[in-house]
Structures are given as C-alpha cells and as structure tokens.
Amino acid sequence: SDDGLQGMRTMLMQKLEAEFGADGVELRRMEMVGPQVGKDLRKQGLLAIVYAMIGILIYISWRFELRFAVGAIVALIHDVVLTFGAFSLFDKEIGLPIIAAFLAIIGYSLNDTIIVYDRIRENRGRYNDKGFPTIINRSINETLSRTLMTSLTTLLVVLSLFIFGGGGIHDFAFALLVGVIVGTYSS
C-alpha cells in the first residue's frame, strides 16, 4: 500500500539523514513489489520450465524418435526434481534467479543427452547387428570422456561461483552445482 511505502520512505530517509546529513542524501525512487507480483512471477517461471520441456519433447521427437524424446524428458524431469529436492532439503528459497538456474540446468543436461543420442544414432547404422543394448553401451563409452571433461570444467566454474560469488549468487550457484552433478549422471 502507499501508506506502508510512505512510512518506509520516511523511516529510511530519517536513518540516512542521521548517518550522512540532510544535504548528503537524495532518495530518487522507491518501489515495492508485493507478494502477489512475486507469486505471479514465480508461476510464470514454472510455466516457462513446463513450456521448455514441451518444446524439447517436440524437438527430440522430430530430430530422433519418440522413444528417445520420452527418455530425454524423463532425464530432464529427474534433474529438475532432484535439484528441487536439494533446495527443499537445505531449506532454500526458490525465486526467479533459481528458476533461471533450472532452465540453465535443463539446457546443460539436454546438450549432453543429445550428444549421446547422436552417437547412438550413428552407431545404429554401423553396429545394427550387435543389438540395441550393445549399441547404447558403446555409444555411452564413446562419449563418456567428453561428458566428464565438459562436466568437470563446468563444475569447477560453478564451484568457484558458489564459494567466492557471495550471497547474491550463492543460491543460483548452488542450483547449478547440484544440476551439473545430477545432469552429468542422468546423461
């Protein structure tokens, strides 16, 4: 409400003027975002995650096959649910930066998944007589070193952000840290 905002403005100005003097302080603008706006933004962010998953399902169905698309979506849901679980376990708040981290996790994990799927598609043409489980095993083994090197490099950067990034980026980096670990495993 305007009364609450005005009262906060008065209190803030009094404290700042007491600390810096009346001539040293100028408050140019003060706004307040209410809980309804925050709730709406969080809802829109979660819808963005759902829409991203639907888009991914369509893309992978078109690019590969429907059975691969279902596997990729299950892996992505697995990554997001485990990261949400880590936030719940450590009692961390989920806000817009965290939803952005979830979208980044989806993209990161999807990249690894598509690389494995591409290798499976290539190996199906080469080793079709070996059987599908053998093709999958061979494809994962062929992409494993690339996945581990990429994940390790990303993990080092995210770990640095987590340790040295400060409070403003701490939860975002935590989400990415959990997401990279879980995404590497699920890919």
Image: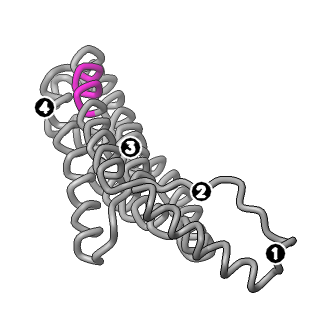
In primary-sequence order, the first of circles 1 and 2 is: 1
Graded by Cα atoms within 10 Å as few (under 14), some (14 to 19) or many (20 or more), the crowding at tag 3 reads: many
Q: Which residue appears at 41% of the width and 37% of the height?
A: 111
Which callout, 1 or 3, points at the residue further toward the start of the chain? 1
Image height of 29 relative to 53, above or below? below
Q: Disc 4 marks which residue?
A: 131
Query: Which is closer to the viewer, label 3 or label 4?
Result: 3
Q: Which residue is mark 1?
A: 22
Distance from label 2 to label 4 (Cα)? Answer: 66 Å
Instruction: Find residue 12 and report its horizontal and vertical position in percent.
Output: 61, 74
Name the dominant secondary structure of the magenta segment. Answer: helix
The mark nearer the N terminus, 2 or 4, is 2
Kindly identify the residue that appears in the image at 59 percent across and 71 percent down. Answer: 10
Over which residues does the magenta segment extend? 53-60
Name the N-terminal-most of marks 4 and 1. Answer: 1
Tag 3 residue: 103
Location of residue 63 (image quadrant): top left
Badge nearest the viewer, 2 or 3 = 2
Can residue 55 be found in the magenta stretch? yes
SS label for mark 3: helix
The percent position of residue 76, horizontal first and vertical second, equals 25, 44
Disc 2 target residue: 30
